[in-house]
Image: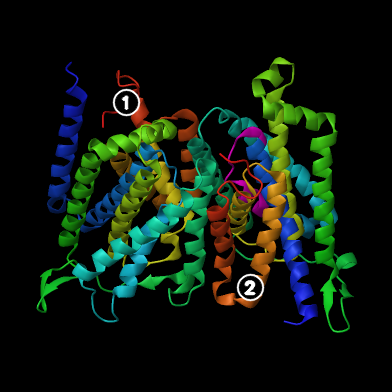
Amino acid sequence: MSPAGPEARLLLAVGVGFVGLAAFPWLGSEFYVDLVVRLMILAIFAMSLDLLIGYTGLVSFGHAAFFGIAGYTLAMLTPAGAPADLVVALPAALLASALAAAVIGFLSLRTAGVGFIMITLAFAQMLYYFASESSALGGSDGLLILFRPELAVGGRSLVDLEDPTVFYYLVLACLAGVLLLLKGLVRAPFGRVIRAIRIDDRRTRALGFATRRYKLASFVIAGTLAGLAGFLEAAHGGYVSPGHLGWHQSGLVMMVVILGGMGTVYGPLLAAFAFGLLQDQVQDWTAYTGLAVGVFVIAVVLLLPRGLAGLVAGRSRQGGRLPP
Amino acid sequence: MDAAAFLVQLLNGVQSGFLLFLVASGLTLVFGIMGVINLAHGAFYMIGAYLAFWLTGLTGNLLLAVVIGVAALAVLGVVIERLAIGFLYRRDHLQQVLLTFGLILVLDDLQRLIWGSDFHSVPVPDLLSGSVALTTQQDYPVYRLFVSGVCILVALGMFALIRHTRLGMRIRAAAANREMASALGLDVGRLFTLVFALGVALAGFAGMVAAPIGAVYPGMGDRILILAFVIVVIGGIGSVKGAFAGAMLVGIADTFGRVLVPEVASMVMYAVMAAVLVWRPQGLFGRPA
């Protein structure tokens, strides 16, 4: 088989998947359209974390911070009794996430390894406790977002996100956009440098790259994309709460990345769908989802250290890592 | 704030610092000796508090509850190390984080399953329920002083164990060079099981003695774990001395933060952590990377 074989097949599979997703609203009931929206948002969130864990080698355990900040920004910008303006709210939310990522990243990147894991978690929990105790942010109940943002020109609504189908296609477009962006990014010279940093930070520095700056850039990009996911999640669910910022959120998305196989972008995308569906099923038959998910996580770590992707890639000659 | 009120807050801060030290030292020991980052450490603190509540209800005696509870937690530690943690020594931190995160989800739900989602309180033992007069107007509860005393004893005992006993020597040898220690005939696997059980018992013990001071509630372990992380980062990862300095700093800063700037109290210790990171990224007592 030619070297391009597996890559071409993967591309074909992802292409077919996207065609399927695009056709889905005509086939599925409203309930399932809703579910697929949530899965796609989780996929965007997971792919953004893969840029950090899988490509840059930065194990961030506070990724939900940027997810939640975007949601809170949307809630703050939504006036009482009217929708927010999409052209204002989306850039503002992304900017808020990017700024937070720049500050937290700047401080956290002073450490590495375990210290980095602990600090990113600590900063995310700081925001979690701040949101839970702040009355302006609604305390532990969070804030309601009664209207999804709208795109209006001169008082005429152009895009009505209240329509589930319209919202579905917006999320699908974001998913495709993030996938293309990340794929382009990891292929670009920037991507080669961050992958070199993951393998050996010191040598990359010795080659003349300011690795700290590359790591910070990667952290900010990942944080901004997590913000996009958080913005969509808050608009979709109609509320934002401290839970969006909390470490359960960070831990679950990290688990999706590992499950899918890190450093692949496609892997976390597929795992988000698989894991999201599984979680949805589990919620139907038990109130103790933590128990089920926890046992599942422990089993995956002990039995499948390279994730589900490792099962597939283990038989190929790719050495367990799919081509970028 | 007058002098007496200041003294009370200082005592509160020091007492909370001692408790935090017990938790953080277990975390830093397990990491320093075994190289494992254990997110479930806070969950063991919570289970300790619930055991104190449950066993005090059964036996009517906090001391007896603590003795039984610590033994039970040590056994739990041995079981978890044998079944799960033991497979992680040669894996990277990411996998340790995930597995212990899964452990938290399981332990949190088991706690809900067994004890429900209500808040509980544990009565202070009669013998220790009084208070002593600090000044003519200001009293201070005996139990809080007792907690500080017990924490000092446990910390000294741990120090003696690691520095001055044969077992401690073996543990230090295994931490310094696992292969060499095992080539010299030490059963490193068993030593690590013991260290992990010790860490679990320390976290649980802290949860038990803290139970009569605050409430016993679901998720109480999360907060303490984050505090322990902040402390370990401030003090320097793997350093017990650093854990002590960090715990005192965080305990006192947090207590005074609540009194002086209540609106932003929860942010104070993170500000301390950020300042330490900018000044000394490796922590107060950590070795430079």
Q: CA distance from mark 2 to mark 1?
A: 53 Å
Please tell me whether the stretch drawn in magenta is mainly helix, strand or loop. helix
> Closer to the camera, A180 or A217?
A217
Residue A131 in the image, given as x and y percentages of width and height: 47, 68
Name the side, left or right, on which A103 lies relative to B54.
left
Residue A46 in the image, given as x and y percentages of width and height: 34, 46
Q: In which quadrant is the C terminus of chain A drawn?
A: top left
Instruction: Indicate the secondary structure of the residue bearing disc 2.
Output: helix
Q: Is residue A238 above or below residue A10?
A: below
Number of marks drawn:
2
Q: Residue at x 44, y 61 (%)?
A: A243
Task: Please report contact status of discs 2 and 1: CB closer than 8 Å, yes or no.
Answer: no
Residue B258, numbered label: 2
Furthest toward the bottom, the residue is: B137
Q: Which residue is mark 1?
A: A312
Amino acid on which the number 2 mark rests in the picture: Arg
- The boundaries of the magenta stretch are B33-52
Q: Chain of mark 1?
A: A
